[in-house]
Image (tube, grey):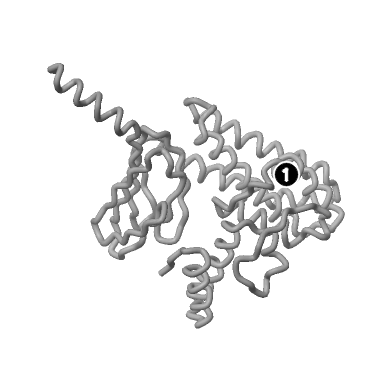
Amino acid sequence: MSRKVFYILFFLQSIFPYSQQITIINNIEEPFDVKYFSKVVTLKKKEKQIISGEGKLNSIIINNHRLNLYLEPSEKLDISVAKDGLRYKGDKDSIYSLIAKIHLINYSKIKEYQQIIEKNNPQQYINNSELTLSDDLKKVDDFWNFDKSTKSYKRLREYVIYNWLTTCTLGLFPGTTGFQKDVVDNYYKKYIEKDIQTFQCDSTFKYAVIEYLAQNKKKLGINLPTYPIIMASHDDEILQYFPTSCQQNYFESKYQFLKSKKDSRQDIFKKALKEKFHHNVD
């Protein structure tokens, strides 16, 4: 390599230090939208979109489904949308099979948790569920043969914890108020309270947890910060405890539900998402 070429490459590397790249490929018949940052791109059959994440892209929305990313600034990942789901190739591509495995294990525990409720033993509920979390996080650590001080690692751990918390709260529904209060008080103090002031709904599981807490705030006796309501609805009693990102999730879930039912009220939520949250939906 000549000295001139070397300096050109060095110069380019100094200007573009990050090369994080995500490629989305449409391998199905129907077109779909890909949303990232503030952009929306429609991909037709066999089309692809190459996204430069610049080390800042933590998630993308593919066909109205959020996909969290755990890439470092120099890593690359190809995501192919196929009939049987998403296929991954590239850096940390096996992380999604790990997440799916952990998800199935967590949900399989709900029946066990509900059997403990029948014994009216809150401490056993806590102990058994936290053994599951310990196994989940061990799987993450065994997989992550990388720097564990990175934001990506911390976000993955948080994602797994809230996946687990979602199953724990679902398992609680047959329990008495006292039982739920004892269990949730433990979870809240250990896993949620430290982040509650900066809480964001960057996954469906975090949304599910904050929704459960807001709906049951009084009977659980927990303190939640309040937020300005972006747009009034009949659920304002709950929405006041939702940060803006969670309120957006609320309106989007309502919109998608009404759209699936071909209910004309979907237009109200579509308009709210566009005007109040600057978020376009199809």
Residue 76 in the image: above or below residue 60 = above
- Which residue is located at x 35 percent, y 47 percent? 79
Quadrant containing the N terminus is top left
Mark 1 lies on residue: 193
Q: Position of residue 66 (x, y in %)?
A: 47, 54
Find residue 16 and report its image quarter.
top left
User: In terms of depth relative to the viewer, which is nearer, 203 or 144?
Assistant: 203
Identify the element where label 1 is drawn: helix
Q: Is residue 147 above or below residue 137?
A: above
Mark 1: amino acid? Glu
Q: Is residue 243 visible?
A: yes
- Any part of residue 256 in sight: no
- On-image quarter of the C terminus: bottom left
Residue drawn at x 49%, y 69% is: 275
Relative placement, left or right, of 105 versus 34 is right
x, y percent for residue 75: 36, 34
Q: Position of residue 108 (x, y in %)?
A: 63, 49
